[in-house]
Image (spheres, helix red, strand yellow):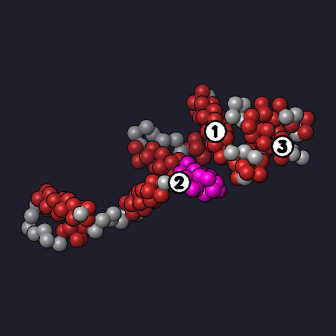
Amino acid sequence: MITDNEVAGMFRLLKDKGYAEVGYEFGLDKKYKNSASMITAVQRATSRVRDNPEKYGISIDTVNDVLTALEHRKTAGLLNRPVEENLTLREKNELLDPKDIKGMVTLGRNKAAKLLNTKLDRISKSKKMLDELDLGKLATVVAIMVDKSQILSGQATENIAVLSKNIDSNLSTEEAIEIALRMREKNMAEKVK
């Protein structure tokens, strides 16, 4: 069994070392029958600290530093090895064509959402970080997420019917758009007042 002090020590070392190095340094190679089990034990210890840093006497800043270092090493490792070594079978089947802009944007969106959720989870678990959170920034993030989700689901982000009710149906598309945009600007200016 790994003690809480060992868990905290392993976590701190992960800022500069990989899972295997930390496992060997703590003698886990003698406690587990293979390196995969040893690495899994270090990863579990990392999750325990990440989920409850206060229990192990580790600050949120240290947690963020260690997790960032791990992610950077993971990314660097992925960039330095052949692509095939880094991908699961599913990922290999889903390789994106560089010309597939929608696919790349979707992949980026999903990664950003995962990172944002992770950061928000960390903030929600830390009273200090929660107290320091700028509500204006949080409101902006929420507003953007709501707006983008409406776009992705095909819903309008503003009520076009209100803007187009005074437009003559005999106008060309370009003229109608120009008038709607001018009306929108006027409405936006009135809202600001």
Q: State the separation of the CA atoms marked 1 and 2.
A: 19 Å
Which residue type does callout 1 highlight?
Answer: Asp
- The residue closer to the viewer here, 10 or 135, is 135
Residue 98's place in the image compared with 165, above or below, is: above
The correct choice, above or below, for 70 with respect to 152 in the image is: above
What span is colored magenta in the figure? 115-132
Which is nearer the eye, 4 or 136?
136
- Decide whether the magenta segment is chiefly helix, strand or loop: helix
Question: Where the C terminus falls, by quadrant?
Answer: bottom left
Residue 155 percent across, percent down from the top left: 36, 66
Q: Quadrant of residue 104?
A: top left
164 sits left or right of 90 in the view: left
Q: Quickly name the residue at label 2.
A: 133
Residue linked to disc 3? 5
68 displayed left or right of 178: right
| Residue named by callout 1 | 65
- Is 79 within the magenta? no
Q: Which residue is found at the position 72% from the left and 35% from the top?
A: 14
Say whether marks 1 and 2 touch (CB < 8 Å). Answer: no
Residue at (88, 40) in percent of width and height: 32
Query: Would residue 52 be seen by someone viewing this image from the given angle?
Result: yes
Say what secondary structure mark 1 lies in: helix
Q: Looking at the image, which residue sits at the far left?
A: 170
Q: Are marks 2 and 3 in contact (CB under 8 Å)?
A: no
Q: Secondary structure at mark 3?
A: helix
> Residue 114: image x %, image y %?
56, 51
Q: CA distance from mark 2 to mark 3?
A: 31 Å
Q: Position of residue 87 (x, y in %)?
A: 61, 39
- The answer to whether residue 120 is magenta is yes
